[in-house]
Image: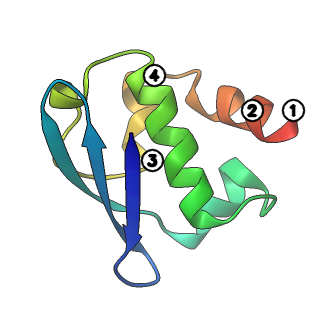
């Protein structure tokens, strides 16, 4: 289960319940939000979709405890295309 709390306009606290509960502080700037989502989903929904994407590829304990959302693309180059596909469907 993924729980998201928006702390301010660019920062989210994400709690992921798996075998262990983890928390992650994630930042999302306006440029990345527009680039990946096209404004078609809320920032919170983009964070949720991004964590669903990550959890399909690694355990919650492997996800960094603090990062900016654009960092995902460094590890998974298919991230923007996959998120856009999910938003479009």
Kindly identify which residue carries mark 1: 89
- Report how far apart the C-alphas of labels 4 and 2 lie in the structure: 16 Å
> Is mark 2 in CB contact (under 8 Å) with mark 1?
yes
Whether residue 20 sits left or right of residue 59 in the image: it is left
Whether residue 72 sits left or right of residue 85 in the image: it is left
Q: Residue at x 62, y 61 (%)?
A: 33
Q: Is residue 40 above or below residue 11?
A: above
Kindly identify which residue carries mark 3: 70
Q: Quadrant of residue 43?
A: bottom right
Q: Secondary structure at mark 4?
A: loop
Kindly identify which residue carries mark 2: 86
Q: Which circle, 4 or 2, is nearer the viewer?
A: 2
> Is mark 4 in CB contact (under 8 Å) with mark 2?
no
- Report how far apart the C-alphas of labels 2 and 1 lie in the structure: 5 Å
How would you rate the neighbour count of disc 2 (Cα within 10 Å): few for under 14, some for 14-19, many for 20 or more?
few
Q: Mark 3 or mark 4, which has the lower sequence index?
A: 3
């Amino acid at each position: 289960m993924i729980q998201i709390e928006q702390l301010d306009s660019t920062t989210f606290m994400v709690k992921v319940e798996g075998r262990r509960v983890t928390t992650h502080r994630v930042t999302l700037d306006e440029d990345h939000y527009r680039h990946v989502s096209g404004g078609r989903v809320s920032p919170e929904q983009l964070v949720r979709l991004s964590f669903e994407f990550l959890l399909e590829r690694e355990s919650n304990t492997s996800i960094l405890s603090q990062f900016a959302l654009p960092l995902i693309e460094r590890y998974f180059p298919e991230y923007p295309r996959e998120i856009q596909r999910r938003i479009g469907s």
